[in-house]
Amino acid sequence: AVVNEFIFTGTLDGCIKKSLPVYREKRDNMVEAIKKYMPSSFKYTFPDGGLFIWGEFEDGTDTAKYLYTAIENNVAYVTGQDFYANGGGGNCLRLNFSNASNENIEKGIKELGKIFSR
């Protein structure tokens, strides 16, 4: 459908209009879950666009330390250090809300909250 729209109209405006409310809802659900479940030391962005939330642990929590525990519990994130060419970002992470259902967003953030509260 997306390819057809682009071929026939030369733009993706219709597709974008349809997807914006879907991603907005997912973003909002993730933010609400973060507020509810993540430790208070976790600060995060509220994106106006895109599909990711960037988070940072003000207490210096090393996100790489917990990645495999998260994966073992069916949750994943990208560690912040993957975005720093010269080191740093060890207390940061990137969360993606584009592909998960609202139910899985809630479950995933709840699980991360447990993991990072240990």
Image (tube, rainbow, N blue to C red):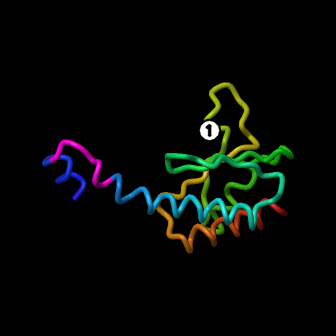
In the picture, the quarter occupied by the N terminus is bottom left
> How many neighbours does mark 1 have within 10 angstroms: few (below 14), some (14-19), or many (20 or more)?
some
Q: Is residue 8 above or below residue 101?
A: above
Q: Is residue 110 above or below residue 77?
A: below
Q: Within the magenta stretch, is there residue 48?
A: no
In the picture, the quarter occupied by the C terminus is bottom right
At x 56% / y 71%, what residue is drawn?
Answer: 104
At x 47% / y 58%, what residue is drawn?
Answer: 23
Residue kind at label 1, given as amino acid type: Asp
* Circle 1: element type: helix
Query: Residue 8: x percent and y percent?
Result: 13, 48
Lateral position of residue 76 relative to residue 61, left or right: left
Query: Residue 73: x percent and y percent?
Result: 65, 68
User: Which of the two residues, 39 or 117, is positioned nearer the viewer here?
Assistant: 39
Lateral position of residue 23 relative to residue 110, left or right: left
Query: Residue 71: x percent and y percent?
Result: 63, 62
At x 42% / y 56%, what residue is drawn?
Answer: 20
Q: Which image quarter: residue 84?
A: top right
Q: Which image quarter: residue 11?
A: top left
Q: Which residue is mark 1?
A: 82
The magenta span reads 9-15
Lateral position of residue 66 relative to residue 3, left or right: right
Query: Residue 30: x percent and y percent?
Result: 61, 62
Q: Give the farthest residue toward the left.
A: 8
Q: How many marks?
A: 1
